[in-house]
Image (cartoon, rainbow, N blue to C red):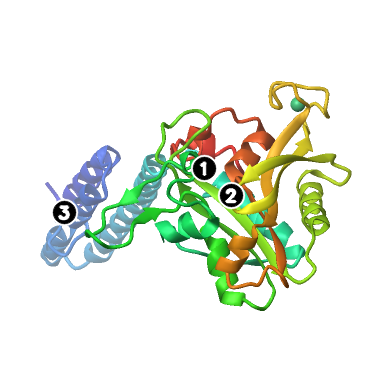
Amino acid sequence: MSIIDQLAHIEQDALSTLPTISSVEALAEWKSSYLGKQGAIAKLSRELGTLPADQRPAAGQRFNAVRGTLESALSERETVINSAAQNDAFTREAVDVTLPGRPTVVGRLHPSTRVLRMIDGIFAEMGFQVWESPEVETDTLNFELLNIPADHPARDMWDTFYIDTPAGAEKVLLRTHTSPGQIHAMRAHAPNPVRVILPGKCYRYEQVTTRHEMMFHQVEGIAVGQNITFSDLKGTLIGFAERLYGSGTKTRFRPSYFPFTEPSVELDVECFLCKGDGCRVCKHTGWLEISGAGMVHPDVLRNGGYDPAIHSGFAFGMGPERITMLRHGIDDIRWFFSGDERFLEQFV
Ligand SMILES: [Zn+2]
């Protein structure tokens, strides 16, 4: 077979196998076996020297033509393979933008914290400072100095978590109310005037029910100075109720009893749900009880470092959980500290 015939054979062979190649690696192999330095065409070209001199130029041109044909066929095939590989990658790595996204969970404040901040804000506008006092107290501060001696019947109102203490040491307990903070605040200010609120947690050793938790918040308030009267107490609490429930909210004071205030009252606000007509939330009375208050008892004033002949004052207390329950119609206090997100995430 002549060199030219062999060349034609190689060309035909190369062009017929090319379309079956589908990978970049196989294409590189094809290139080196036909067009490479050790490839079929290069090997055959070494025999050009055996041709008679007058045939060499034409044969050389033929070689160049075949190389050109194969190179352009190669580059065409390369384009096809590359775009197929690219399409493959696109399909493999495709992002389905129609898939619904995952919602981000946003943290939020606990409902008790929200109401505490609201209460703090209202009293801050009225010139009350926020004061903190310890959650662990002595029996003296939690009871005795607030006019609640050991044999006082009012002790029954505060079932208490006592903490084990060495024999002979003073009894220590988890405070049952924020009222011992009154003593701390008065002692820190006496004989100068004091006007603070004391928000914080309280603890009661009692059966947990829909209405009672063993841990809850209270906000205590106290103002002591000269010429502080019952009118100041009324004005402060009515102002608070109007800021919390809207101006024009009806309020009423009922006589009550607390060992550390005299006289003592309870503050009711008109039921915001039924506007006084009576409903389930207000137990058909038309009124909601939101605070206990009174004029600071002379003994308590003395225990705080004031002279009742010169100084007078008022104090009040309220439960943020109770206020939240009334605002939102929540019928079970256990929701607050259950950690149940279905409850907590409703307060945005
Ligand atoms: Zn009502």
Q: In which of the image's four quarters is ligand 1 placed?
A: top right
Residue 259 shows which numbered tag?
A: 2
Name the image quarter holding residue 300.
Answer: bottom right
Q: Which residue is mark 3?
A: 33
Q: Residues within 10 Å of mark 2 (few under 14, many from 20)?
A: some
- Which of discs 1 and 3 lies nearer the camera? The answer is 1
Q: Amino acid at mark 2?
A: Pro
Separation (CA) of disc 1 from disc 2: 7 Å
Q: Are marks 1 and 2 in contact (CB under 8 Å)?
A: yes
The verdict on label 3 being within 8 Å of ligand 1 is: no
Instruction: Identify the element where label 3 is drawn.
Output: helix
Q: Amino acid at mark 3?
A: Ser
Q: Say which label, 3 or 2, has the lower sequence index.
A: 3
Identity of the residue drawn at 26% across and 63% down:
60
Pointer 1 or 3: first along the chain: 3
Q: Is residue 55 left or right of residue 110?
A: left
Q: Helix, strand, or loop for circle 2?
A: loop
Residue for point 21% across, 42% down: 13
At label 1, the amino acid type is Ala
If the image is split into quadrants, where does the C terminus sit?
Answer: top right
For residue 230, side relative to residue 97 (left or right)? right
- Residue 311, percent from left and from top: 71, 70
Quadrant assignment, res 183: bottom right
Crowd class of label 3 (few under 14; some 14 to 19; many from 20; radius 10 Å): some
Q: What residue does disc 1 label?
A: 154
Decide if ligand 1 comes within 8 Å of the CB at mark 2.
no
Give how far across and how far down residue 78 sits, in percent: 34, 51
Question: In the image shown, does 314 or 332 lie closer to the viewer?
Answer: 314
Q: Position of residue 241 (x, y in %)?
A: 77, 47
Marked residue nearer the N-terminal end (1 or 2): 1
The answer to whether residue 188 of the structure is visible from this angle is yes
Q: Residue at x 61, y 55 (%)?
A: 220
